[in-house]
Structures are given as C-alpha cells and as structure tokens.
Amino acid sequence: MLSSSERPQMVSPGSKDATEDLRKAASALENQALVEQDLLPANQGQIFNKSSIMQMAKYQVPKRSGDIIMIQSEHTGTIDVLSSDLESADLLGDHRKVSPPLMAPPCIWTFAKVKEFKSKLGKEKNSRLVVKRGEVVTIRVPTHPEGKRVCWEFATDDYDIGFGVYFDWTSVTSTDITVQVSDSSEDEEEEDDEEGIEEPVPVGDVERGSRSSLRGRYGEVMPVYRRDSHRDVQAGSHDYPGEGIYLLKFDNSYSLLRNKTLYFHIYYTS
C-alpha cells in the first residue's frame, strides 16, 4: 500500500512545465534587476537571460484556475506572482464611471389662475425670490422618507423663465430644501468644482431646450426649457426613483436685461 507521499498526484497537462518555466523566467528577471543594481556579477545574470527569457517570451499567460501570473515593475524590477483566480477581481479599485439609470418621465400640466397663485404665495415665507439677469437658481429638494413623489408649481411676473429637473443619486442626510444661486451655468460649474461637488451642466440653447451634460451620479428628469410661467402656472410631479436629491433649475442665464420674480411651491406626497 502506497503512503500519502508515494501516491501519484493528478497534475494538469503542462502544468509542471509551465510552473518550471515561470520559475526560471522569474529568476532570470530578478537576476537582471540585481545586475542593473550592481548587486550581482553581470556574467551570472547572463547565464539565465539567454535561455529563460526566451522561454518567457514564448510562454502564453496561463488562464486555467490555479495557474499563476507574474507582474514585473518597470521601475524596480520587482516581480509579483498572482493566481489567475484574481483575474476577475478589480485590482485597480472601482474607479469605473457608471452611467446613472434612465429616469421615468415626469407628469406636467398648467393651470390658468396665475394671479390667485401669486397672491397666495406672495404672503408665504420662502416662496418668492428674484432670479437676476444671467443667473441660474437651483432648488435642492431631498427625497423624504414619508413621501413617494415630488411636486412643484411656479409662476413668474411679466416674463418667462427656463426650467428643468435633475436627480442626484446620493445619500440624504437632511430633508431641508436649500437654494443655490450662480451667475450662469458656467460659473455654477466652476463653483461646484472648487467645492468638490459635481452638478449637471446644462448644454445647448434654453430656447430649444438645454440638454444636461450628465456627470457622475446625476440623472435627467426633464431638460431646461423656457416656460411661459408668466401666462400659466407651471406644475408637475415625479415619482421617487430612489433616495437622492432633486435639483430644480430656474435658468435666467439667457436674459441680459431682465430680472425674473419667481413664485414657487414645492412639496412631496405619499
């Protein structure tokens, strides 16, 4: 009866030769690195270079489970030996940019009672603001744990304004609604870069509808278009796609002369 050390072992064809070739090549490369660093006589390094390196050049990288892969540093000559099982692992880290999922379209409508709407909101706190010429105002509306959709209504005095909605796929730490003002879309981008915060950058003509250049985690609910908010109240809603922050953009960057007085009501429903 054979002992465990005497029992024949099952080895995949060519695995011994492949492993031996790799070991020889690794030894050759290590010796070459030592020669370059004056730590090994040059003639000793040359003994391995001619035969082993030629074998390395002919040898294809193994892809069977359990085989090994060698990686040599171009700077130090150091050799790392990895299992091919790690090929499926992300050795460089998760730096791949994943496009945000497509957003469901919003429901939008208008109604004609502009005077009554503005009269009511004019008496309420934080429901009226002035969007100056050349400015873009972004109202950030986090999703609410008790809500299922966001709703908006707005109107302006005398003139129209650009309006669009985007969604930031980010964790919500506060349900407070905040307002951000920038001089223009370009200035807004520069400010966000300085603060380390990315925003969707509207690209194109507000007259025809600006398409946002989506960066990173932002999704487009509806592009920025000029709305006749001085004639009818503009209203809409959108079902929560998940946790995140809605960005409601009021764009007056196309106006060189006129400020726009904005009346708005933003809320959630369950």
Image (cartoon, rainbow, N blue to C red):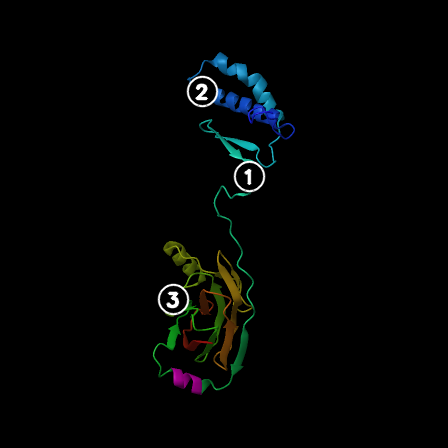
Q: Nearer the viewer, mark 1 or mark 2?
A: 1
The reply to whether the magenta stretch includes residue 239 is no
Q: Quadrant of residue 136?
A: bottom left
Dot 3 amino acid type: Val
Q: Earlier in the sequence, mark 3 or mark 1?
A: 1
Q: Is residue 127 above or below residue 215?
A: below
Q: Nearer the viewer, mark 3 or mark 1?
A: 1
Distance Cα–Cα, label 3 vs label 1: 51 Å
- For the residues labelled 3 and 1, say whether their Cβ atoms are less than 8 Å apart: no
Residue at the image point whose x is 55% and y is 43% from the top: 88
Q: Label 3: which residue? A: 181
- For the residues labelled 1 and 2, say whether their Cβ atoms are less than 8 Å apart: no
Residue at the image point whose x is 58% and y is 18% from the top: 51
Q: Where residue 257 sits in the image (x, y, percent)?
A: 42, 71
Magenta extent: 116-121
Quarter that holds the N terminus: top right
Q: Label 1: which residue? A: 85
Q: Earlier in the sequence, mark 2 or mark 3?
A: 2
Residue at the image point whose x is 55% and y is 60% from the top: 101
- For the residues labelled 2 and 3, say whether their Cβ atoms are less than 8 Å apart: no
Q: Where residue 83 sits in the image (x, y, percent)?
A: 53, 35
Distance Cα–Cα, label 2 vs label 3: 61 Å
Which labelled disc corresponds to residue 34? 2
